[in-house]
Image (cartoon, helix red, strand yellow):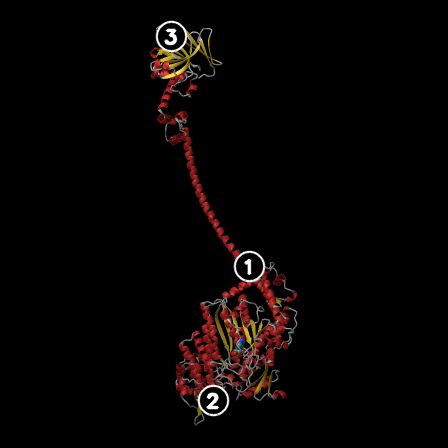
Amino acid sequence: MKDRRRRVRISQRTSLEDRCNRILRNMEASLTARDRVGIQDFVLLDPYTSETAFLDNLRKRFHENLIYTYVGTLLVSVNPYKELDVYGKKQMDTYMGVNFFELPPHIYALADNVFRAMMSEFNDHFVLISGESGAGKTEASKKILHFYAVSCPTTKILNHVRDRLLVSNPVLEAFGNAKTLKNDNSSRFGKYMDIQFDHQGGAVGGHILSYLLEKSRVVHQNHGERNFHIFYQLVEGGEEDLLRWLGLERNCQHYNYLVQGNCAKVGSINDKRDWKTVRQALSVVDFGESDTEDLFSVIASVLHLGNIEFEADSEGYAALGDRREIHWLSKLLGIPAQVLQRGLTHRKIEAKTEEVLSPFSVDHAVFARDALAKAVYGRAFDWLVDRINGSLANTDSSRKNVIGLLDIYGFEVFNVNSLEQFCINYCNEKLQQLFIQLTVKSEQEEYEVEGIEWEPVPYFNNKIICDLVEEKHRGIIALLDEERLRPGKATDVTLLEKMEETVGGHPHFVTHKLADQKTRRTLRRGEFRLLHYAGEVTYRVEGFLDKNNDLLYRNGKEVMQQSKNAIIKSCFPPSEPDRNKRPETVATQFKSSLAGLTDILGTKEPWYVRCVKPNEAKQPGRFDDVLVRHQVKYLGLMEHLRVRRVGFAYRRKYDIFLQRYKALCPDTWPNWKGSAAEGVRILVRHLGYKTDEYKMGRTKIFIRHPRTLFATEDAFQVCKHKLATRLQAKYKGYRVKGDYQKQKEAATKIENCWRGLKARKERRQREWAVAIIKRFIKGFMTRNKPTGADNREYLAYVRQNYLTRLKENLPKTILHADSWLRPPPVMEEASLLLRQLFLRDLSRKYVRGITEERKAQLVLKARTSFLFKGRKTSYPASVGSPFVGSRVALQDMNAKILQLIQRQNVTYTVPVLKYDRNGFRPRPRQLVFTREAAYLADGARIKQTVRYDALKGVSVSDLSDNFLVLHVKCDDVKQKGDLVLQCDFLFEALTKLSAIVDKDDLIRVVRGSVRFDIQPGREGFVDFRSGPKALVYRAKNGHLTVESASGENI
Ligand SMILES: Nc1ncnc2c1ncn2[C@@H]1O[C@H](COP(=O)(O)OP(=O)(O)O)[C@@H](O)[C@H]1O
Ligand SMILES: [Mg+2]
């Protein structure tokens, strides 16, 4: 299966064009090679009407061991009579999944094509294998069966079925085949085998129909022939124990039934080996120990029966000679010896009301014995087929397709031909009729019905012969049956007379009496000749009636009914058909079973294998022209070829053809709206069919060459996969779309729910927010009211908000203390407290962070501020300039002065301008402070000393000048008066002074004029005023006027 799939895949991959080219190349190759190996398909033969050319081709190929040749799809097989190395697994693989014409002809190609046709068309098929005895039919059917067994998909169960199908063959061959003059393994029964396949192509069951076993062989064989193989196999190969148990000896010569042909041993047959095969096969088809015992008991009892001999007793009646055989028969069949004995020597006659036993004559007894042996073997054979069918049966009721293999005895002509040959050859006539109907005749009729232009091919229709044999009331079979009802004694001679009387004028019937002189010489009395489609056969009427009646005396039947052997029991059921009704004759039974077979085959598609026998001697490499020419003729091969050549290889109803291939044309795919015929016309035009390649009939399209169809089929196979992929994609798309739709719906649902949830949440949030805002607004509106339910939250928020903001906007340093965030009303108090706290903290931090020096500086600055802030215009400008310890370093001071004052007492020295008391001339001096007094020094002299306790105060203006007036207590006129000084470091000097003196009101800031004492009792004035620029002069009124630049107000 794997191989098959792989092959299919590979073949799909190769493009259609490639395949067509390959086919053409093959065909061309076969054409060029024709001189050596002939051509593979007779359809390519030129001239196709020449029988000689046909034969030449067949011969050429035969001598090259090319035994297979096609006539279209019909396979001609020539028996090579030697093993050819062309049936291995390798060959099977090669032929799997390959069209005809792509490879050399082979039975596997046919088998594979049948299989694939079945799989793709879902219908039943059969392979009709025909040819005369020994032409290779059975071998061909086995090859086909083998091919299916190996190449069909398998499973464990299927393997089981396959094994059974395969082993059913050796079993049936052992019991139903025999060596004849024509064939060492000649099938002496017709076999139609159905192989059932499930929809995946697995062989799941089988059924066998058997036709007319040549029972006469059980008791009689012509010279050079044998009985059925199983007898020899048992005697030669049977295990010692078994033989002992069956009462048999290992010597065929001991058994009458085995030696009549005088050739129990044949070189080409290995009975011992075959016995083993059969034993093994029986176990595969479910034969248990007791089944095989019963079966071999039956076979052995037939041999024992054959050895029973009769002697005439004193009254001339038959009496048993040796009783040993009876003993064994009794044992093997489980029938009392006495009953057997009576049954073999007497017949039962119904006399009025009672049954009377009438003794046999010796001849009669022999006849009855043989009849019994034939009946036992024949019925056991039918039982065997039933059993095998039971083991092949498929019980599963699902739909199956079948391939039937028909391997039925071929046309037979012996020196002496009897009823068996008559039936066999009649069977072949029927099959030929079927072949004609299915091919030539139906083909021509079809062309006519379809209105296809067509050149009629003459062919021989053998219906006339079939009628001769089977026609009601007038046919030979009817006459045979009639004879047994004839009043008086019916004999074979009277039968012949009757035939001459009734069908004497028939062109295919001749007897000694009716023949012309020339023919008469070849015919004896007591013979009749039929001109069969396959040739003339002379039948000897002797035994016809008996064989046809297949008379088994009732007594014999009754004896068998008593058997304890399970097989015999079931073969001779107690309820045998109505005693008074005559059983159907052999020929009639055969006729109706053939009619049944024709019906079975009529419902299936036919395929043909025509087997040809190259020589009568079973010799390899010998090609007997006359013999083969004869077969070619009667097998209808020439006619078939002619039909093929002028006809069309393939035809199908328009709708079926369109249905299958419509995918190959965009106009017809996926649906064609118009008529099927029109659709097909468009389709084939699209496919590029040439006008001579096809014809349009009334209801069907006819395609001339298989290659055209194969190309189309190949294209379809390729296209099918594309379509399947497309369908798959569409379906997947559809599925995914469905899933997507569902997912989308689900998503929407979830989304809706989620949105609803969110909306509800949002609404709640909004409600909540509205409430909050409302409360906020209300709180805002009532913010100034006492804390209550309305504004509690708002105020808390305000507080928190303020505190948060405050935290982020706190003054960075003490210097930014003014930038305190404005508090909302509710926080005013808290803010204030916080501010104080914070500032205190800041201050503390600041204070902690400053040096002693700086602290001292600041203390002084604070004092300055205390003294001047808001009072003197120039104060703000002075704040930025730091104070220094002294404006004149000690070392820069006059040493004399320092001596006078004592240097350790000097606290501060600053240069000043001193305005004379008279005339107000400015004199540069140094003002020196000590702990006790201030000194005005000029060089090395101290001009004036002002003790602090004598210092009444210091006056400065509120303007931006830098004048100061030191008011001194003057108790003494001699003493100098107040000092009018100008000092660049006014604030520094005064602050230091104030610090030393530490008197609250020491410094006075005055507006306008300052009165001062020039001398005690003599006053002077300094007028301070603002002007366009700084100016100091003595005014006309004798006052010192100090003008400060205006715009420098506080
Ligand atoms: N394809 C074959 N290859 C080799 N030998 C064959 C082949 N076909 C037939 N034979 C030989 O011919 C004999 C008769 O073939 P068989 O099939 O029994 O004939 P049929 O069934 O037509 O009477 C076989 O036993 C076998 O020896
Ligand atoms: Mg055969």
Of badges 1 and 2, nearer the viewer stands 1
Residue 669 visible in rendering: yes
Q: Is residue 824 depicted above or below 713 in this figure?
A: above
Residue 611 horizontal/vertical position (percent): 56, 76
User: In whole angstroms, how far apart are the C-alphas of marks 1 and 2?
Assistant: 77 Å
Q: Pick the residue in front: 234 or 366.
A: 234
Of badges 1 and 3, nearer the viewer stands 3
Q: Pick the residue in front: 608 or 793.
A: 608
Residue 240 horizontal/vertical position (percent): 40, 82
Q: Secondary structure at mark 2?
A: helix
Q: Is residue 608 depicted above or below 852 in this figure?
A: below
Q: Mark 1 highlights which residue?
A: 722
Mark before the other along the chain sequence, 1 or 2: 2
Q: Mark 3 highlights which residue?
A: 976
The image quarter in which residue 19 lies = bottom right
Mark before the other along the chain sequence, 1 or 3: 1
Position of 433 compared to 981: left or right?
A: right
Of badges 3 and 2, nearer the viewer stands 3
Q: Secondary structure at mark 3?
A: loop
User: In whole angstroms, how far apart are the C-alphas of marks 3 and 2?
Assistant: 205 Å
The image quarter in which residue 770 lies = top left
Q: Is residue 249 depicted above or below 1035 in this figure?
A: below
Q: Secondary structure at mark 1?
A: helix
Residue type, label 1? Lys
Q: Are marks 3 and 2 in contact (CB under 8 Å)?
A: no
Q: Mark 2 highlights which residue?
A: 364
